[in-house]
Amino acid sequence: MSSDISFTIQRLRFDEHYQPSDSTRITTNFANLARGQSRQQNLRNTLRMIDNRFNELAHWDNPSADRYAVELDIVTVEMQLGAQRSQETFPLIEMLQTHILDKQTGQRTAGIVGNNFSSYVRDYDFSVLLPAHNLDRAGFSTPAHFGELHGKLFKAFAGSSTYRDNFSKPPVICISASTSKVYQRSGNQHPVLGIEYQQNELSSTDQYFAKMGMQVRFFMPANSVAPLAFYFDGDLLGDYSSLELIATISTMETFQKIYRPEIYNANAAAGARYQPSLKHEDYSLTQIVYDREERSQLAIQQGRFAEEHFIKPYQGVLQAWAAQASV
């Protein structure tokens, strides 16, 4: 029955002319930046920050710190349920893929896909299902089989011919470290990813991504102020080139500075023992307008959309598929 689920990919360039399509998850961070009166200036400033950070980290043979530019594609993954439903698709996942332009040689190479990961089903799990489960409970818990359907759907896509036809390496998803966990600096330091931190225990997000087949490591790159969480399947340090890793760092650190400045644009760097906090007051704001409160509200709307148009209508089909899925 797994053959009854298929995937298609659409790409849209994220540049200063980007406008969210009607099908784009409006909770996605890059879509939030591209709306309102400041939209084009937001986009220009964001892209400039990404390029500047890339050239800072890729400093070899780059004396003027302007050799490289990062190009970004928004990758939308749509899922189709069965041949008999060939006209019915659901927007399952959105990710960013980086591309690296060497302006000195004119060479353009594909970077890592993943980066800013978003998902309708994840919105449903965290913004609808989880709050409902914990309503009036004395302590926090997760429902039985929480995240299993999402994890199997993601692994089905990552193992599909559609993925192999479009991407040569496994995805890497880079997000914020958890504000509920404590991180301890280790003795490990990578030449690109920087200082490795280790957490005291797994977060609910770590457990959720584990069901997607991904493990996590935390690194604070040079001249960063807080560690980033890198979720991957494979060998994070061995599977990707330095420029590929730098493109992911520069892209995702820029987004984190914009929408979590208390952590990633703080005025002091993380110490040997570190716990991120959105209540931290010693930080700087970027020149980019971002509505974090609106995004939180829209996440609930997107989760309810998934419930109404995907989870409930296809519950039987999805349960049957998940029960026999080999991924």
Image (tube, rainbow, N blue to C red):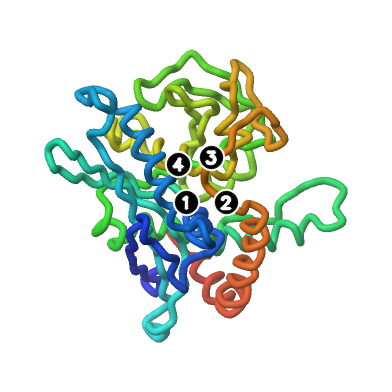
First in residue order: circle 2 vs circle 4: 4
Q: CA distance from mark 2 to mark 1?
A: 9 Å
Residue 227: give x, y in percent of width and height: 52, 29
Left or right position of 52 against 23? left
Secondary structure beneath disc 2?
loop
Instruction: Look at label 3 and name its amino acid.
Output: Thr
Q: CA distance from mark 4 to mark 3?
A: 15 Å
Determine which residue is flagged by label 2.
290
Where residue 122 sits, quadrant-wise, is: bottom right
Q: Residue furthest left?
A: 105
Q: CA distance from mark 2 to mark 3?
A: 10 Å
Q: CA distance from mark 4 to mark 1?
A: 16 Å
Q: Residue 90 or 191: which is nearer the viewer?
A: 191
Quadrant for the N terminus, please: bottom left
Instruction: Look at label 2 and name its amino acid.
Output: Tyr
Vertical comparison of 214 with 148: above or below: above
Q: Where residue 71 is drawn, which disc sits there?
A: none
Secondary structure beneath disc 4?
helix
Q: Where residue 286 is drawn, which disc sits there?
A: 3
Determine which residue is flagged by label 1.
42
Determine which residue is flagged by label 4.
252
Q: Residue 120 or 36: which is nearer the viewer?
A: 36
First in residue order: circle 4 vs circle 3: 4
Q: CA distance from mark 3 to mark 1?
A: 10 Å
Q: Are marks 2 and 1 in contact (CB under 8 Å)?
A: yes
Where residue 103 sits, quadrant-wise, is: top left
Mark 3: give few (<14), some (14-19) or many (20+) Cα within 10 Å: some
Instruction: Look at label 1 and name its amino acid.
Output: Asn
Residue 22: give x, y in percent of width and height: 46, 73
